[in-house]
Image (spheres, rainbow, N blue to C red):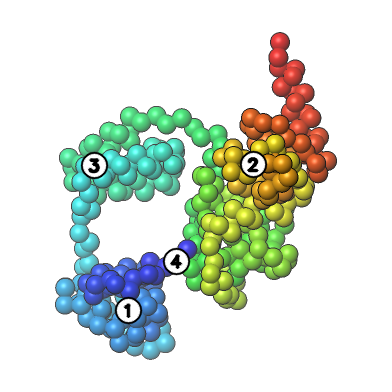
């Protein structure tokens, strides 16, 4: 995750001034030095962007001293949201598709969506509200949405490179607490993960944020790997480090198996005579067996007693279902 100002080397002075305004609004009391760091410019340039805001009539106050810095003064009025009807409707549809409770004004996402709709011009707002009220999205039983405040805290710690202490509840109900360096927050197939360095395991770990029961930001800071690929590393990690090892030989070449199985099941290795060896691990053997059941070719579980037991149980249940 990057800050709002990363990768902005080609941004115009006016755009950078608006980014400066965003930072001042979200961080009252921010100094010119820190503002420059967040914008990726010198302190002198940061002061110039503040001057641009003032020239545009935006009241930016400044105070000297250790507790001083920039603050947005009274009287600031933001411009209305200039959405076209198609943009507004696309936004409402996207929110409803990804968060089905957004039609409920009492839901945090629903409340935020309502504020956006109320800020739109009346003709556009009327169409957006009609879609919001008329849509009846089916509940997503597989959804696992994390607590917004927990997610916000983890994203902020990732951006600021601050260590956190998290409480966690596993799928089996076991609870623990540990200190981690939050490298990134990654969304994968509707689930939110914290990709981090665990100081207990002294290794990379990925935790589902919906299972994080508590989070507190610590004073220690950290540096994430310079070549970090959060999505790629998460995909690799999801197949390793779990309680139960798995090893499966599939009677098909790697390029075909890749199309049938999720990447998170494990590492695919080219075997002899056109076969593929799947090596991984899981905390849920029953789920793993169900993923293997989609294979349209023969396969053998060569390692993993828990997976063998789960596959046997699945086969028995499917056989019993045939009348």
Q: Foreground mark, 3 or 2?
A: 2
Q: Quadrant location of residue 289?
A: top right
Contact between marks 2 and 1 (CB within 8 A): the answer is: no
Q: Residue furthest bottom?
A: 65
The residue drawn where x is 30% and y is 87% is 44
Query: Where does residue 202 sit, x and y in percent of width and height?
Result: 71, 68
Q: Foreground mark, 1 or 3?
A: 3
Contact between marks 1 and 4 (CB within 8 A): the answer is: no
Query: Where does residue 54 sit, x and y in percent of width and height?
Result: 20, 77
Q: Which mark is residue 86?
A: 3
Q: Which mark is residue 2?
A: 4
> Vertically, is 215 above or below 135?
below
**Mark 2 lies on residue:** 253
Q: Foreground mark, 1 or 4?
A: 4
**Mark 1 lies on residue:** 70
Camera sees residue 150: no
- How far is disc 2 from disc 4 in space, using C-alphas? 39 Å
Contact between marks 1 and 3 (CB within 8 A): the answer is: no
Q: Which mark is residue 303?
A: none
- How far is disc 1 from disc 4 in space, using C-alphas? 23 Å
């Amino acid at each position: 995750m990057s800050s709002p100002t990363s990768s902005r080397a080609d941004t115009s002075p006016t755009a950078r001034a608006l980014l400066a305004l965003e930072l001042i609004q979200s961080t009252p009391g921010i100094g010119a030095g820190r503002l420059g760091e967040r914008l990726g410019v010198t302190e002198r340039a940061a002061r110039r962007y503040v001057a641009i805001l003032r020239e545009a009539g935006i009241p930016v106050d400044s105070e000297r001293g250790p507790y001083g810095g920039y603050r947005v003064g009274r009287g600031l009025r933001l411009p209305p949201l200039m959405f076209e009807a198609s943009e507004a409707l696309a936004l409402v549809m996207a929110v409803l598709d990804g968060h089905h409770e957004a039609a409920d004004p009492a839901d945090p996402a629903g409340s935020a969506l309502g504020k956006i709709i109320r800020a739109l011009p009346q003709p556009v707002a009327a169409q957006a509200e009609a879609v919001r009220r008329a849509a009846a999205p089916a509940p997503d039983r597989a959804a696992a949405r994390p607590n917004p405040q927990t997610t916000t805290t983890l994203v902020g710690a990732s951006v600021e490179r601050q260590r956190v202490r998290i409480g966690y509840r596993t799928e089996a109900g076991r609870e623990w607490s540990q200190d981690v360096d939050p490298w990134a927050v990654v969304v994968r197939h509707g689930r939110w993960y914290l990709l981090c360095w665990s100081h207990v395991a002294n290794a990379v770990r990925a935790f589902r944020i919906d299972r994080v029961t508590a989070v507190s930001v610590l004073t220690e800071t950290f540096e994430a790997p310079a070549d970090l690929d959060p999505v790629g590393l998460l995909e690799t990690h999801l197949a390793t480090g779990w309680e139960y090892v798995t090893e499966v030989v599939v009677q098909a070449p790697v390029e075909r198996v890749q199309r049938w199985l999720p990447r998170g099941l494990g590492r695919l290795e080219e075997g002899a005579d056109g076969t593929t060896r799947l090596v991984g691990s899981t905390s849920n053997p029953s789920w793993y067996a169900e993923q293997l059941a989609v294979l349209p070719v023969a396969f053998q579980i060569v390692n993993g007693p828990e997976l063998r037991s789960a596959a046997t149980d699945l086969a028995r249940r499917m056989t019993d279902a045939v009348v």
